[in-house]
Every structure is written in C-alpha cells, then in structure tokens.
C-alpha cells in the first residue's frame, strides 16, 4: 500500500532526528522517494514540502532539499528585560547571545509623524512626532532580527536616545536617566510568513516564518514610553518564558 506524504515526511524527520541526515545534508530527492516508497511523484514532492513548511528542511531550487541547521538563540523574556540587565550597562540584546559573535547594523535614527497604531500605543495625539530607531541584529554573520522602536519625540529629542549609540545600558538606561525608566513590559507575538522584503532583510531560507513581536514599555505609573516592533527569524530562536504561580487561594 503506497505511503502518504505525511507518513513519508514523518519517516524522513525520524531519520533526521536519529542523525542519519545531519545539518546541511541533502535529503533524498523525488525520484529516490518514488522508488523507495512506491508513490507518485506528486506525493514525494508533497512530503518534502511538508518538511520545508515545518522548518525541518529548506529547498535550493535546482539543487535539492536540505536539512536545516538549528543553533537556537534562547530569548528568555524575563531575564533580558530585568532592570539589573540594562542598569548595569548591558544591552538587553546581549542577554540572548552571550558568548556568540554579534553586531547591530543598519542603525537609523530619525523623527517622523507617528503611525496611527504607534500614537495609540504611546497615548499621543494623532499626528504627533515620534523618534524612530531602526536596526538589524546579526549573529555569527547572519541577520536574525529587525527591530524598530518608537518614542515620543518631545520626551527624548535632546537625549542620547536620539543618537545612534545611546550609551551603556541602551535606551532603557537613558529613559531611567530622565526619570522615565520602564518597570513593566507587555509583549504580543504571533508567527506568520514574511513578505519578500522581510525575507530579504533577514536573508531567510525559503519556507522560513517570522515571529512578530510588539512590545510596550511602561513606567511605574503605567505610562508608555516605548513601543517596539520586532521581526525574528523563527528558524533561529527559542522563546522561553518563566512564570511563578499567583494563585491567591494557595495557603
């Protein structure tokens, strides 16, 4: 009885997990799968597409399908946003990539009219000016994240936040310098497929999704001081969240 595309994909994934096909290895092509499993060429092609869609493999047109190499960046939300991280002069980004070569490139800092969603997030009047900070993060030579932060221009215009290098501790340390240090953060995230422009900016392999994150930083009084839109290469990240029980009925 012919195997289904799902069964073939599961078999190939098991062979990947066992180490038979290591990172970067070329998987059997459609002719080999047709012969091995006794299926139609379309079924073999769909099995390979399943592995690509799940992130286990990537396709090189005209060459074949290869096992994706995954060396995860572990993004631990509570650790990277802790005040002890940025108040000691470290960037929150450095918490993700300790010991790995990294760089921040394509930094742009400029003023603009706030997009409507940014004005709402920062509690600004429609048409208010915002300071925009855009950059890309590169680890071991590969772009893994693109981020754009927005601040009320009147709040930060005359501070180091308006400079390409805001200094030790980054923008949160500089917000603290003017009495607006963030103490609470709200992150909303979803996974989706990238646009062609986003794929190019992050140099994504075909079939790689992105994780889109919107983060709002709030002062102790609950006032928003920054909103940050991030796009992460989903093939490069593991997202970790640590929680404690807040059950009021525990004794």
Image (cartoon, helix red, strand yellow):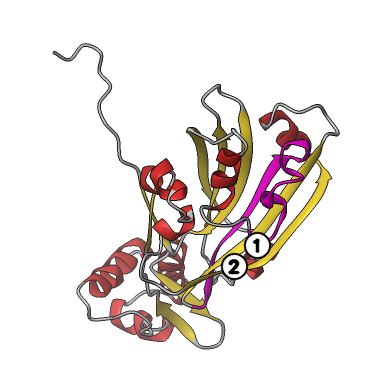
Q: What is the residue that sits farthest to the left in this orientation?
A: 251
Identified at 71% across, 57% down, the residue is: 163
Viewer-side residue, 81 vs 20: 81
Q: What is the residue that sits farthest to the bottom in this orientation?
A: 63
Q: Disc 1 marks which residue?
A: 198
Q: For numbered disc 2, what is the local secondary structure?
A: helix
Decide if residue 138 is on the left or right side of residue 198.
left
**Is residue 3 in view?**
no
Q: Residues within 10 Å of mark 1 (few under 14, many from 20)?
A: some
Residue 191 x %, y %? 51, 49
Residue 51 x %, y %? 40, 67
Labels 1 & 2 near each other (Cβ < 8 A): yes
The quadrant holding residue 200 is bottom right
Identified at 61% across, 58% down, the residue is: 194
Q: Disc 2 marks which residue?
A: 202
Part of the protein shown in magenta: 141-165
């Amino acid at each position: 009885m012919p195997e289904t595309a799902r069964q073939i994909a599961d078999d190939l994934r098991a062979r990947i997990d066992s180490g038979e096909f290591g990172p970067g290895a070329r998987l059997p092509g459609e002719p080999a799968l047709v012969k091995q499993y006794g299926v139609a060429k379309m079924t073999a092609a769909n099995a390979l597409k399943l592995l690509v869609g799940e992130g286990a493999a990537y396709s090189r047109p005209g060459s074949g399908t290869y096992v994706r190499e995954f060396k995860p960046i572990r993004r631990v939300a509570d650790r990277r946003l802790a005040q002890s991280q940025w108040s000691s002069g470290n960037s929150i980004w450095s918490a993700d990539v300790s010991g790995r070569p990294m760089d921040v490139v394509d930094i742009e800092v400029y003023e603009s009219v706030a997009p409507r969603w940014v004005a709402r997030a920062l509690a600004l009047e429609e048409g208010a000016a915002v300071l925009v900070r855009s950059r890309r993060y590169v680890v071991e030579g590969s772009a893994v994240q693109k981020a754009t932060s927005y601040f009320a221009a009147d709040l930060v215009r005359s501070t180091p936040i308006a400079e390409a290098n805001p200094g030790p501790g980054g923008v949160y340390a500089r917000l603290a310098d003017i009495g607006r240090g963030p103490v609470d953060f709200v992150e909303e995230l979803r996974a989706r497929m990238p646009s062609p422009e986003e794929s190019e900016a992050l140099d994504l392999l075909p079939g790689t999704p992105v994780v889109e994150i919107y983060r709002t930083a709030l002062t102790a009084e609950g006032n928003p001081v920054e909103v940050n839109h991030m796009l992460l290469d989903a093939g490069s990240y593991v997202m970790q969240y640590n929680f404690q029980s807040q059950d009021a009925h525990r004794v």
